[in-house]
Amino acid sequence: MDAEGNACVITTTLGLGSGVWLPGLGINLNSMLGEGELITDDLAPGGRMPSNMCPLVVIDPDGRLAVAAGSAGASRIRTALIDTLLGVLADDLDMATAIGRSRFHVVGDTVHAEGGYPGDELAALAEAGWKIEQWSGLNHYFGGVTAVGQAGAAGDPRRAGVGLLL
């Protein structure tokens, strides 16, 4: 974000990723068109495939930038962004803390939770009938948020991200 309040964020997705990196740019090339969970039987010529891409901007009541955020992570993009927004806007966390805290993501009837996610919340989900898959520590599976706004700028520690205020 610059001194005038202009901000830039990017949301990316790779599918499986090709393992081919552009030299000096840190960009991994895609190996497929679309995510497996998004490819449906009703695709037709000229139609658009659904996407989990979700770059977002939140404006405060005074018309100023509150948060601009994007993420990598396929189907986990929206989960990662929602958790970050809740951290900043509802829990009053600074950007780095909101992005770096443990997350969860639901797949079918299973809640995948990073190490450090609050045990009482996971216990309540298990009691409600959800299966819990506990991961050890933070993991790149849970997205890669980069965000900037009134709560600062930060990149996801899961993916060696950075956030800059200029």
Image: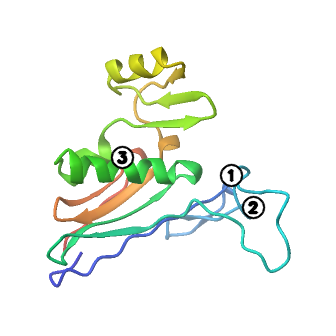
Q: Residue at point 18% right, 76% down?
A: 64
Q: Residue at point 82% right, 66% down?
A: 43
Is 93 on the left-hand or right-hand side of 11? Answer: left
Amino acid under disc 2:
Met
Please identify, in this view, whether the residue under mark 3 or under mark 2 is nearer the observer: 3
Return the disc, 3 or 1, that comes first in the chain's sequence.
Answer: 1
* Nearer-the-camera pick, 71 or 31: 71
Please identify, in this view, whether the residue under mark 3 or under mark 1 is nearer the observer: 3
- Residue situated furthest bottom in the rendering: 4
- Asked where in the image residue 123 lies, by quadrant, the reply is top left
Helix, strand or loop at mark 3? helix
Dot 2 alpha-carbon crowd within 10 angstroms: few under 14, some 14 to 19, many 20 or more: few
Q: What residue is pinned by disc 3?
A: 83
Mark 3 touches mark 2? (CB < 8 Å): no
Dot 3 alpha-carbon crowd within 10 angstroms: few under 14, some 14 to 19, many 20 or more: some
Residue 154 locus on image (x, y percent): 27, 57
Mark 2 touches mark 1? (CB < 8 Å): yes
Return the disc, 3 or 2, that comes first in the chain's sequence.
Answer: 2
Amino acid under disc 1:
Leu
- Is 33 situated above or below 79? below
Q: CA distance from mark 2 to mark 1?
A: 7 Å
Q: What residue is pinned by disc 1?
A: 16
* Nearer-the-camera pick, 86 or 6: 86
Residue 159 appears anywhere in the view: no
* Quadrant for the C terminus in the image: bottom left
Q: Residue at point 35% right, 35% down?
A: 102
Is 91 on the left-hand or right-hand side of 43? Answer: left
Residue 55 locus on image (x, y percent): 44, 67
Residue 9 locus on image (x, y percent): 38, 70
Point out which mark residue 46 bears. Answer: none
Q: What residue is pinned by disc 2?
A: 32
Return the disc, 2 or 1, that comes first in the chain's sequence.
Answer: 1
